[in-house]
Amino acid sequence: MAKNDLDSLSIEELAALRENATDKLLEKVSARRAELEAELEKLALYDRLAKKSPAAPVARAKKSDEKISDGAKEPIAKAA
């Protein structure tokens, strides 16, 4: 709407326009909020599934690997 159109409106017409614009804005905000809440529900489903699934098993080191990683050295043959 052009500025000239607003200048030609009466106070009552401007007030009605403002009320209609506020109502339309509230309607659009409510619709968008509903869309976002639905999307959050979908994402929350994945979060709940991730918390329920068991953790992946952790690979354990073999005893021979543990000795080497602990800094233990292989026995050195003594000279005769």
Image (cartoon, rainbow, N blue to C red):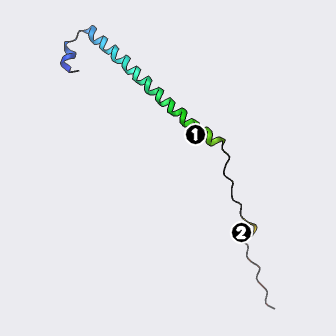
What is the residue that sits farthest to the bottom in this orientation?
80
Label annotation for residue 46: 1
| Residue 77 horizontal side relative to residue 4, left or right | right
Amino acid carrying mark 2 in the image: Asp
**What amino acid is labelled 1 in the image?**
Tyr
| Kind of element beneath mark 2 | helix
Question: For the point 76% across and 82% down, which residue is it?
Answer: 76
Q: Is residue 18 above or below residue 40?
A: above
Q: Is residue 74 left or right of residue 11?
A: right
Displayed quadrant of residue 11:
top left
Labels 1 and 2: the sequence-earlier one: 1
Q: Give above or below for 13 relative to 25.
A: above
For the residues carrying marks 1 and 2, which lies nearer the camera in this image? 1
- In the rendered image, residue 13, in percent from the top left (x then y), is placed at 27, 10
Q: Is residue 48 above or below residue 63?
A: above
Locate the N terminus by quadrant: top left
| Residue occupying the point 76% across, 67% down | 63
**Residue 65, label in figure:** 2
Residue 31 in the figure: left or right of residue 3: right
Name the residue rendered at 36%, 17% in the picture. 22
Quadrant of the frame with the C terminus: bottom right
The crowd level at tag 1 (other Cα within 10 Å; few <14, some 14-19, many 20+) is few
Q: Give whichever of 49, 1 is nearer the camera.
A: 49
The percent coordinates of residue 47 (x first, y second) are 59, 39
Question: Is the residue 41 above or below the residue 76 in the image?
Answer: above
Coordinates of residue 26 in the picture (x, y in percent): 40, 20
Mark 1 secondary-structure assignment:
helix
